Image: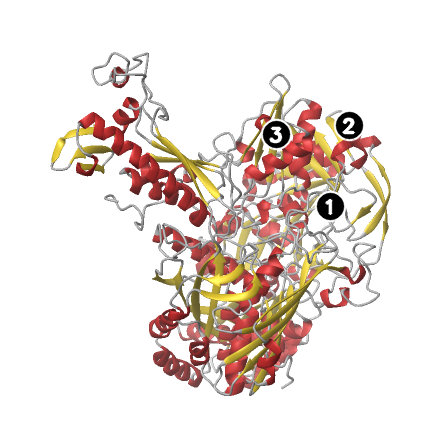
């Protein structure tokens, strides 16, 4: 690895194009004569559809078609249950267009296809749907009570799944504990709010029988498989491309959203390209969300603060449907003990239907909730035992020598037992204590209090199981004319910088600069084996597949160069886009030349090609041009399948100033100590962490999807849904630890979700610490708003 | 989120604009568009015609006399904020406008438009009330002036008659011994405030408060003069006790119901805090100006 691109702060390769406005997002794809889609969506959280009258809309001149469930033929199906699970005994998924009943505000009832989006929106207002509203219960705890109004008539208590897992002997641990800490915490619903909303466009070629779909999805290969299956087409006749996509965060990996199925269907039916560009309002009411969980957690501890056991029982809001199975609740339940050496755990959850838009994973996927529960509990344990917050954590952290650390009996979202692969948890906490200058801060806090200012230290430790299977693959080819390295992989990018880090990985093996590596992903025509982008897995799973494929190509390069330069492989150096004999830089061949020479040619179409035609001096004349088992060119395909998740972790801390009169908070400092194994590119790791912290600040202090008692979203816009601006997000000081993962050749772990996980805890514990002299009450619910701080301070006091 | 079909005209004069408006009762005036365009895109409003007044040259000027600043209806908020003459004549405007949304919004948004829109949480109506300003309006029946105290009737409702448009906003020049301040609390930088307080206090040579004008936004169904709070201050020394009494009076003016960001109790608490802080700054500035 002479060029050592791995680990370098290579600038993002996509940015020059994107900042010049040369990106190609779905709405930028030129589709001549494309029709546009708008949906009639349910205005009721729960209702029976008595009738739908589309007559007036169908008569509009600019309307090409109007569809209800009756017009869908074989597509009027229940959407797939993507991840079945034995505990999920009441799975419910939706239909592309509602039949009979509607289950949340925003559910699609009818689809209009018109000349443009303006007239499509005119037309949906002419469609008259007669609803009979039904009773609803929006409160999660009330929804599981006997007799509560049901989301699905045949699902009692609205419980979709009930799952219990345990490890060790929890009852024994609680029996011998000196102290039991109990806490009840809640995290509220938020939404990913990607900059680009979802979008899908499709074109059907009647002559070739080929369907081309542009979908802003995180899972193009899976969408392709599903579309081919449902539409009855051969997989090779369906091409799904995810072009430039403006953020995903998990929201774009639900297959299928109704539009993902209906837009290709309409394109086939109408024989014209069809486009659906979701608007912000639709994104708020129609695209999946996450987060609401209520945990009741108990810690059994010795009087010295050693945690012997943990019990947690929680409710998980799954919305009206559960296409993604129990994944979020399962991740939360298996992350519940965080970084701590808790040998005895009992955890149960109920996944509960509510008449709201479907819940699927959003960056963090159950981890922010689990982190908030365990970390608030650890703070409470420290308070109750009179111990320092750092100290109680230090006493319980998994030690370096404990790795790999298993929690037998707890099955993670990959279906495998939880096994933390590596880490230096104690070192991370010590680094934080040192960097934040605990003693200095204590003095500063005292001085501030003397001036009537309130500073607090927020602290949160988290773990993240990353890089889940099953697998990804990569195909790499060195182009004969340019010598550029083409890398294909199956998952897709939503702005994370895959093109940069994947290029770095391949560049190291192939002795080129990262800018000479062209990464193509998210296109089933380029590579169609693989899964999707989710679970902080791209760098781990695709990254290692690319590394393995590149290593194979490297061997081919050296083999071919050895023949061309008549030198032993051991004496060759692959560097700077060429191979040369060690110590004799003039005896060299460029990658383009080697790639060209590796392909026996008949036609000398350019100067370079002359060297590899059949009659060129270097050509072999002792048999066929390609020997048995040989292949032309420099290319290889390989795959990587992780044995189980690789566990990243980190510690966040913040110095927070609270104004007790305004009940507002200001971040004075925000610090993150982070370990995601070996870093391919520290700049991009820091970008991921910063973005995660920004979303975490949203969940900690600002963002809450609100419903009224009838289930109407109350803040489905960016004015009322308070996504933090840059002015609200603190600058983060980021410190790295690199503990390689022993699980994969590159030693990497995922980083995509890390930043958002502990922020709720950091804010709540920071505010609690700041206002402790004022006797603030428990802070066990996020987002922690100023009004909640006001209430925790005792509410209105009459002077 | 696409607007419904509408006609669009661009009159060159106030007369043409008023005539166009009179000819179509479902038409609306379009100035900076920062409130109107979203309501069109959400299809909350369905006007038949937009009368874009942005090409009317007569509405684009700022005039400053010894007593009054006159700001044309098409002057963008950002232009007012950056106008050094306005800053010298009445520095309250810049302080208020800094709290109005974000630069990109202020680049297009107009002061007159914000006042005509009369959002109860908006800053500019409160500023107009505290300043004792007025608006010039023109309609089919001719022109008239409406004092700020008579302008705001309800959330999004003014005393303008159908067909009338604001042509200019008039704001008195700040008296030499008057101190000013505006403070608000918003969840995010640039958001509508949960509560905002605007204060102008005038001191005599002995430090006695000869006049106090206070207003609030975000706490009732309109921007609001805080008359009882003013009464606690006028004629007396502006000491801590008076400020506390005024803050308490201001707090009792809160009538906004609980919403998702603020309970009534929290909003009352905010108003109390903001009133105290705003008055403290206004007082200091009044003392500084008197000393000059």
Which residue occupies the foreground of this view, A308 or B88?
Answer: A308
Q: CA distance from mark 3 to mark 2?
A: 23 Å
Which secondary structure, mark 3?
strand
Which secondary structure, mark 2?
loop
Question: What residue sits 53% from the left and 67% below the top?
Answer: A371
Q: Nearer the viewer, mark 3 or mark 2?
A: 3
Badge 2 is on which residue? A60
Examine the image and state in which quarter residue A176 appears: bottom right
Examine the rendered structure and indicate whether residue B72 appears above or below residue B96. Answer: above
Left or right: A415 with respect to B228? Answer: left
Q: Nearer the viewer, mark 2 or mark 1?
A: 1
Query: At which x and y percent is residue A182?
Result: 61, 79
Determine whether label 1 and label 3 are within 8 Å by CB. no
Which quarter of the rendering shows the N terminus of chain A? top left
Examine the image and state in which quarter residue A218 appears: top right
Does label 3 or label 2 sit earlier along the sequence? 2
Badge 1 is on which residue? A94
Which residue occupies the foreground of this view, A619 or A430?
Answer: A619
Kindly identify which chain the residue marked by label 3 belongs to: A
Instruction: Answer whether residue A437 is visible to the viewer in this image.
Output: yes
The mark total stands at 3
Does label 1 or label 3 sit earlier along the sequence? 1
In the picture, the disc for residue A202 is 3
Query: At which x and y percent is residue A703?
Result: 59, 60
Determine whether label 2 and label 1 are within 8 Å by CB. no
Q: CA distance from mark 2 to mark 1?
A: 29 Å
Is circle 2 on the same chain as circle 1? Answer: yes
């Amino acid at each position: 690895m002479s060029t050592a691109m791995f680990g370098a702060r290579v600038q993002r390769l996509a940015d020059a194009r994107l900042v010049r406005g040369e990106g190609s997002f779905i709405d930028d794809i030129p589709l001549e004569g494309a029709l546009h889609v708008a949906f009639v969506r349910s205005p009721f959280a729960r209702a029976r559809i008595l009738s739908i009258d589309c007559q007036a809309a169908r008569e509009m001149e600019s309307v090409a078609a109007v569809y209800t469930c009756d017009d869908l033929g074989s597509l009027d199906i229940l959407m797939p249950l993507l991840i079945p699970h034995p505990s999920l005994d009441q799975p419910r998924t939706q239909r592309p267009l509602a039949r009979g009943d509607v289950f949340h505000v925003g559910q699609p009832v009818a689809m209009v296809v018109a000349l443009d989006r303006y007239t499509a929106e005119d037309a949906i207002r002419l469609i008259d749907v007669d609803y009979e509203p039904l009773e609803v219960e929006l409160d999660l705890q009330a929804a599981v009570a006997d007799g509560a109004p049901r989301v699905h008539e045949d699902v009692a208590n609205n419980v979709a799944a009930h799952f219990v897992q345990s490890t060790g002997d929890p009852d024994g641990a609680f029996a011998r504990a000196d102290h039991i800490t109990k806490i009840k915490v809640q995290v509220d619903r938020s939404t990913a709010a990607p900059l680009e909303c979802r979008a899908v466009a499709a074109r059907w070629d009647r002559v070739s029988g080929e369907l081309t779909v542009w979908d802003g999805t995180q899972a193009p290969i899976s969408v392709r498989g599903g579309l081919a299956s449902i539409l009855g087409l051969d997989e090779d006749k369906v091409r799904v491309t995810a072009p430039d996509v403006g953020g995903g965060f998990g929201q774009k990996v639900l297959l299928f959203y109704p539009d993902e199925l209906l837009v290709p269907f309409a394109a086939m039916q109408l024989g014209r390209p069809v486009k659906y560009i979701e608007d912000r309002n639709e994104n708020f009411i129609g695209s999946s969300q996450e987060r609401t969980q209520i945990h009741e957690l108990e810690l059994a501890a010795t009087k010295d603060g050693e945690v012997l056991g943990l019990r947690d029982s929680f409710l998980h809001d799954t919305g009206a449907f559960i296409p993604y199975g129990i994944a979020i609740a399962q991740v939360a339940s298996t992350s519940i003990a965080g970084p701590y050496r808790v040998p005895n755990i009992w955890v149960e959850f109920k996944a509960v239907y509510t008449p709201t838009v479907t819940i699927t994973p959003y960056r963090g996927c159950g981890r922010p909730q689990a982190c908030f529960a365990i970390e608030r509990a650890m703070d409470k344990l420290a308070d109750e035992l009179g111990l320092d917050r750092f100290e109680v954590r230090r006493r319980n952290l998994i030690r370096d020598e404990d790795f790999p650390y298993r929690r037998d009996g707890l099955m993670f979202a990959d279906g495998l037992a939880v096994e933390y692969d590596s880490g230096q948890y104690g070192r991370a906490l010590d680094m934080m204590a040192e960097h934040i200058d605990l003693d200095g801060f204590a003095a500063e806090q005292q001085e501030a209090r003397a001036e009537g200012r309130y500073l607090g230290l927020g602290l949160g430790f988290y773990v993240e199981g990353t890089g889940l299977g099953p697998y990804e693959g990569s195909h790499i080819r060195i182009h004969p004319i340019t010598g550029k390295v083409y890398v294909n992989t199956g998952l897709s990018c939503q702005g994370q910088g895959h093109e940069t880090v994947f290029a770095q990985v391949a560049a190291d093996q192939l002795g080129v600069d990262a800018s000479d590596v062209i990464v193509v992903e998210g296109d089933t025509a380029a590579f169609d084996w693989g899964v999707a982008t989710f679970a902080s897995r791209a760098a781990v799973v695709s990254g290692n597949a690319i590394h393995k494929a590149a290593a194979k190509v490297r061997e081919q390069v050296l083999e071919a160069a050895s023949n061309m330069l008549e030198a032993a492989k051991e004496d060759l150096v692959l560097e700077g886009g060429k191979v040369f004999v060690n110590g004799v830089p003039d005896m060299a061949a460029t990658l383009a030349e080697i790639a060209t020479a590796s392909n026996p040619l008949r036609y000398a179409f350019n100067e370079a090609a002359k060297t590899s035609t059949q009659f060129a001096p270097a050509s072999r004349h002792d048999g066929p041009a390609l020997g048995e088992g040989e292949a032309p060119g420099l290319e290889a395909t390989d795959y990587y399948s992780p044995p189980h998740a690789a566990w990243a972790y980190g510690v966040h801390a913040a110095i927070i100033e609270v104004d007790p009169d305004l009940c507002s908070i200001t971040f004075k400092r925000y610090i993150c100590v982070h370990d995601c194994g070996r870093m391919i590119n520290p700049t991009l790791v820091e970008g991921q962490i910063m973005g995660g912290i920004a979303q975490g600040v949203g969940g900690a202090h600002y963002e809450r999807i609100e419903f009224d008692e009838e289930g109407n979203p109350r803040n489905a816009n960016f004015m009322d849904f308070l996504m933090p601006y840059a002015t609200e997000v603190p600058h983060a000081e980021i410190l790295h630890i690199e503990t390689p993962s022993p699980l994969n050749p590159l030693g990497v772990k995922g980083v995509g979700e890390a930043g958002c996980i502990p922020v709720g805890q950091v804010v709540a514990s920071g505010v609690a610490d700041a206002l402790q002299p004022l006797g603030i009450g428990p802070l066990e619910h996020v987002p922690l708003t100023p009004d909640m701080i006001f209430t925790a301070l005792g509410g209105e006091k009459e002077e | 989120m696409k607007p419904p079909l509408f006609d669009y005209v661009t009159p060159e004069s106030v007369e043409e604009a008023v005539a166009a408006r009179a000819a179509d009762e479902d038409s609306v005036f379009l100035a900076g568009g920062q409130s109107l365009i979203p309501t069109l895109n959400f299809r909350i409003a369905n006007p038949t015609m937009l009368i874009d007044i942005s090409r009317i040259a007569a509405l684009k000027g700022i005039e400053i006399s010894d007593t009054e600043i006159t700001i044309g209806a098409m002057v963008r908020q950002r232009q007012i904020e950056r106008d050094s003459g306005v800053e010298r004549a009445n520095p309250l405007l810049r302080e208020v406008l800094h709290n109005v949304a974000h630069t990109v919004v202020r680049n297009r948004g107009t002061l007159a438009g914000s006042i005509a829109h009369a959002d109860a949480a908006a800053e500019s109506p409160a500023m107009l009330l505290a300043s004792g300003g007025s608006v010039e309006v023109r309609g089919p029946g001719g022109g008239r002036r409406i004092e700020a105290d008579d302008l705001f009737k309800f959330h999004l409702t003014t005393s303008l008659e159908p067909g009338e448009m604001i042509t200019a906003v008039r704001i008195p020049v700040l008296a030499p011994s008057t101190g000013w301040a505006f403070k608000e609390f918003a969840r995010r930088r640039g958001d509508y405030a949960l509560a905002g307080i605007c204060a102008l206090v005038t001191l005599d040579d002995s430090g006695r408060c000869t006049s106090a004008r206070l207003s609030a936004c975000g706490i009732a169904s309109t921007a609001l003069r805080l008359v009882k709070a003013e009464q606690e201050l006028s004629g007396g020394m502006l000491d801590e006790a008076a400020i506390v009494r005024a803050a308490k009076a201001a707090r009792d003016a809160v009538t906004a119901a609980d919403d998702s960001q603020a309970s009534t109790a929290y909003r009352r608490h905010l108003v109390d805090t903001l009133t105290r802080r705003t008055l403290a700054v206004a007082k200091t500035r009044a003392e500084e100006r008197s000393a000059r």
